[in-house]
Amino acid sequence: MKLTTRLKSAVVRWFNADAAASGRVSGLAGDAGEIVSENSAMSLSAVWACVNLLAGTIASLPVMIYRPDGKGRQQVAADHPLYRVLHLSPNYDQTALDFWEFAQASLELWGNAYARIERVGGQVIGLYPVAPGSMVVRRLQGGDLEYRWSEEGRTYTATDKNMLHIRGFGGNPLGGMGTLQFGRNTFSLARAGDRVAGKMFANGMQPSGVLKFDKFLTEPQRAIAEDKIASQFVGARNAGKPLILEGGASWSQISLNPEDAQMLETRSYSVEEICRFFGVPPFMIGHNEKSSGYPTSLEQQVLTFQKFALRRRLKRIEQALTKQLLTSDDRAKGLSIEFNLEGLLRGDSQGRARFYQAMTAIGAMTINEVRALENLPDVEGGDVPRMQMQNKPITEIDREAIRELISEEQGQKP
């Protein structure tokens, strides 16, 4: 191993050990030697697409507060003070979509989402997001969790009573497991592949060659060969310029392209590896290679994404909000916080129509309930549940069949 290689490896090991000891999970060097931080990871198109897809989809779903109405149904508690905070505007600067997009992106990259809670009279009136990169969490002797972070040159401290903490995968009360930390080597390899591909294009995609000389070169001749002649083959700026060789020198082209070096295959594999870390099917971010094992219809793709990628994320957020933001009195009254998944059907008019038709056909929804979901006014008689005429209880069908059988037997008697 060359001295420079050993020195570089030692520096990388020292940098990673120092960062790990200080609690930083971002800005570490991966096995490929590339530094992985939040910005460098998001510069990868696959990471950007996965985070954008997950955070954008979840942020677009309405966050609702429900209370039981005494008849076994859940009604939207629009009069609850927390409804406006979660559903419309968590704070003065952000809309609900902005807030939840930032929170979900933090969960995807760092494994944690934090927000400072502002209360008045015991009710939550505001949520202020905190960047997870500077957060340090520790358990106090009394059992409470302490949160310490820096923002705009100031240091803040809070306890779990005034901090919303949504944990990612892992189940540790101090914090979830971040993708930036555990996917560091994969992101580093992808960054290295992009860097090599960029250098190839910067050199005009011209592979290297060999300068041959009949005799050993003197020091002045070697300087000329390295500085003057070899420089003609570096950079696209010199593409097409004539090359003049003298003194018995000859040029031999080395034929090598990215496909022969499996560069394209390596970059494609990196996309699939990144999708595995985020749990996103590759076709959802435009990577259609080897997609024969995935559903082809849009409806099935959405269902697959909803079941295996969104459900556990939504459940994690719902339980954290219900536990940390609702008061004990609210929970005793049966109030709950849930995402409205019907928002996923807003862009699919045909899917909504089939859903409404099925729900009204079995009497599960009324006409006015359907119209309310479509922001249409009520109509007269639309509050009465309706069913198809042929839908009868089995017991009635059995009695009718017996009566018909008896009638037939009586009609056959003389």
Image (cartoon, helix red, strand yellow):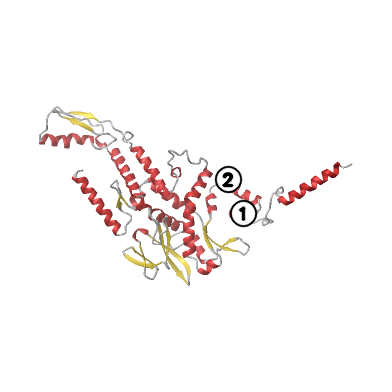
Quadrant assignment, res 194: top left
The percent position of residue 334, horizontal first and vertical second, equals 56, 65
Identified by mark 1, the residue type is: Arg
Identified by mark 2, the residue type is: Gln
Q: Which mark is residue 34?
A: none
Determine whether, in the image, residue 232 is placed left or right of residue 108: left
Determine whether, in the image, residue 36 is placed left or right of residue 222: right
Q: Secondary structure at mark 2?
A: helix
Quadrant assignment, res 138: bottom left
Q: Earlier in the sequence, mark 2 or mark 1?
A: 2
Instruction: Name the residue that disc number 1 marks.
Output: 371
- Answer few, some or many: residues within 10 Å of disc 2's Cα (few below 14, many 20 plus, some between 14 and 19): few
Which residue occupies 35% across, 58% down? 133
Instruction: Name the residue that disc number 2 marks.
Output: 350
Q: Is residue 216 visible?
A: yes
Q: Nearer the viewer, residue 109 or 371?
A: 109
Disc 2 and disc 1 in contact, CB within 8 angstroms: no
- Answer few, some or many: residues within 10 Å of disc 1's Cα (few below 14, many 20 plus, some between 14 and 19): some
Indicate the quadrant containing the C terminus: top left, top right, bottom left or bottom right.
top right
Which residue occupies 85% across, 41% down? 412
Q: Nearer the viewer, residue 10 or 222?
A: 10
